[in-house]
Amino acid sequence: MTMTCHEIKDVTVPYLELDLEPSRIRDVTAHLEGCGGCRAEMEAVRQVLVRVKGVAVPDPGDRFWNELPDRVRRDLVREQAMRHGDTVPLRPPGATGAQVKIARWPMALAASVLLFVSAWSLAGLFDQGSAPAPSQPRAVAQGNRLPASEPDLPQLGEAEWHQLWDEDPDMALVEMAAGLDRQAVDRLFRDM
Amino acid sequence: MAESDDQVLDRYAAGDETAFEELVRRHQKTIYNLAYRMLENHADAADLAQRTFVQAFLHHQSFKRESSFRTWLYQIGMNLCRNAIRDRARRTHEDVHELELADARDIFAETAGTELKNRLGRVIRTLPMRQKEALVLRVYHEHAFTEIGTIMRCSEGAAKANYHHAVDNLRRALAPDEG
């Protein structure tokens, strides 16, 4: 089938990219063999495509490629946190919908409780010091007796400790520290 | 045999952290390249590539697997590119194409420095957005028109028409007596 120049113009790009039926390609080729104008136009379009393809994107370098996954991960965690209120995702969300997340307020509560328990444990430790058990350093130091004049563990009884703790926890801590300083530290150095 | 993207995505969905990094590494160059071709500077392209992956992982459950994961990433990336170009224009109240001329680094001038390449860069920048998308996807990413249609969310015929118009515009703009 003979094609007109106008028809050739419409199929220039598909012809160059071999995106035509084989019979159509034969028709275009036949036209080009006898038409200098269309041949020149075809070559001009081919040159444009070659030039466009020849423009490269500068490579940002290995460091960029190596860091991109971590940057994506940080952004993703931030986005997920924003979308789910104040929750922090611990792992990728599962397809089953199972997500392991810990809300921040229980973590804060747990920290407060831990702090409180620690304070009580510390208080209990010094409290035990007022009524020394056989397992206390005193027993360890038996073979290395202290002088009679050496001040003993704090002289407050358990009830008094509790009362002091209730009335003035700061002062109770100061007392405990003073007791620790007098006995445990001195005894420790003497044992050494 | 190498694991397919869908298989790696399944691992990610099941909580495998290594799958996340594997998917990013597999496609980061492709997506960055697409963003650079559309936005024409490194900072914007890097930001857009990052956002493309974040969006993909945020919404991975909405990926219906009707196309490949890669095509789906292209769709997300191309949408973000469109938005970024529109945002640029909105920010400065300028015409999109004039803004691109003023704002983008002339990568074509950098790589060649010839008047023809300068003109080529300017013409590509001033192409209508859909034509530029079709040109980038076809010339630089060598997609079939079916896939270009999927990425651009249009028919294969519309993708072809946009591409042919783009080449035609380039040809006319670069002709010695017209450019």
Image: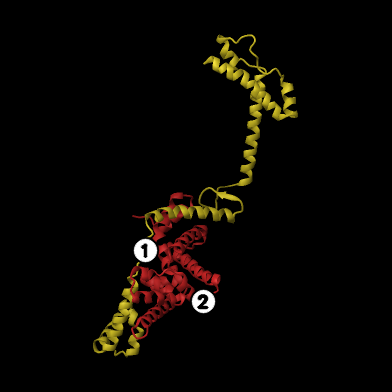
Chain colours: A yellow, B red
Residue A160 or residue B133, whichever sits in front? A160
The furthest residue to the left: A33
The image position of residue A77, as x and y in percent, is: 53, 52
- Location of residue A38 with respect to B154 vertically, above or below: below
Give the quarter of the image for residue B121: bottom left
Looking at the image, residue B158 lies above or below residue A96: below
Identify which residue is drawn at 44% across, 70% down: B150
- Would you say A159 lies left or right of B41 here? right
Numbered badge on residue A15? none
Residue A67, percent across and down?
Answer: 43, 53
Residue shown at 63%/16% (left/top)? A133
Please name the amino acid that badge 2 sits on.
Asp
Task: Read off the residue under disc 1.
Answer: A58
Does residue B143 show up?
A: no
Say the numbered circle drawn on residue B95. 2
**Pick the front one: B11 or A78:** A78
> What chain does badge 1 belong to?
A
Write the residue at 34% across / 83% down.
B175
When the figure is inspected, residue B100 is found, relative to residue B22, above or below; the finding is below
Q: Amino acid at mark 1?
A: Pro
Neighbor class of circle 2 (other Cα within 10 Å; few <14, some 14-19, many 20+) is: few
Q: Could you say where residue A126 lies in the image, as x and y percent from the top left?
A: 65, 23
Q: Which quadrant is home to the N terminus of chain B?
A: bottom left
